[in-house]
Image (spheres, rainbow, N blue to C red):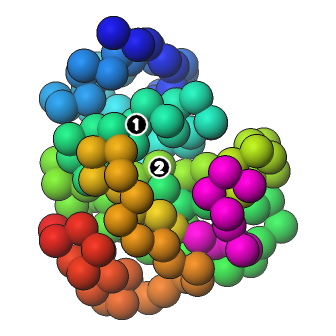
Amino acid sequence: MASFSIQCPHCKKSTSMVTQSLSNTVKCEHCSKPVLDGQPVEADAKSLDKIIISPVPVIAVFWGDNCTPCKAFKPIVTKIAKEKQGKLRVVFVNINKNKALPIKYRLRGVPTTISFKKGRQQAVLNTALRKNELMKWLTDSLSI
């Protein structure tokens, strides 16, 4: 049973998780709010590897500090995370802080969104989209 820590999107404190808990709604040990459902979380290489094995489909949005399209795309993804609470988990990954991940996932640029089901990569999106277009892409790639 592997454990890892992520930052709670609500209280911003680090909270511990175990991979077995990914099938359930995980609550922050500090504020008791759901950590992975309804709000995107920031992930690093270690936590991303653990989160994508979730039985709930996951999208990882890779972004960069100086990327204007990324800044416009993040609020759209956040809205979808709220709307798809319990059916989709959303992870943001800053490529400036996680320099090995663009190589691992063969990113061509940012923003890049990768969808996962039970740890298996399903599809890659190499651009930012409007909300309705992103919803269609999610339906096509993850059937949600």
**Residue 57 sits inside the magenta stretch:** no
Residue 109 in picture, x, y percent from top left: 73, 74
Image quadrant holding the C terminus, namely bottom left
Badge number at residue 51: 1
Q: From this viewpoint, is residue 53 visible?
A: yes
Q: Tell me which segment is drawn in magenta.
A: 103-112
What amino acid is at disc 2? Val
Q: Which residue is mark 2?
A: 91
Q: 115 or 75: nearer the eye?
A: 115
Image quadrant holding the N terminus, namely top left
Look at the magenta stretch and give its main secondary structure: loop
Label 1 vs 2, first from the N-terminus: 1
What amino acid is at disc 1? Ile
Q: 122 or 51: nearer the eye?
A: 122
Residue 71 in picture, x, y percent from top left: 65, 70
Residue 62 in picture, x, y percent from top left: 61, 60
Discs 1, 2 touching: Cβ within 8 Å: yes
In the image, 99: left or right of 111?
A: right
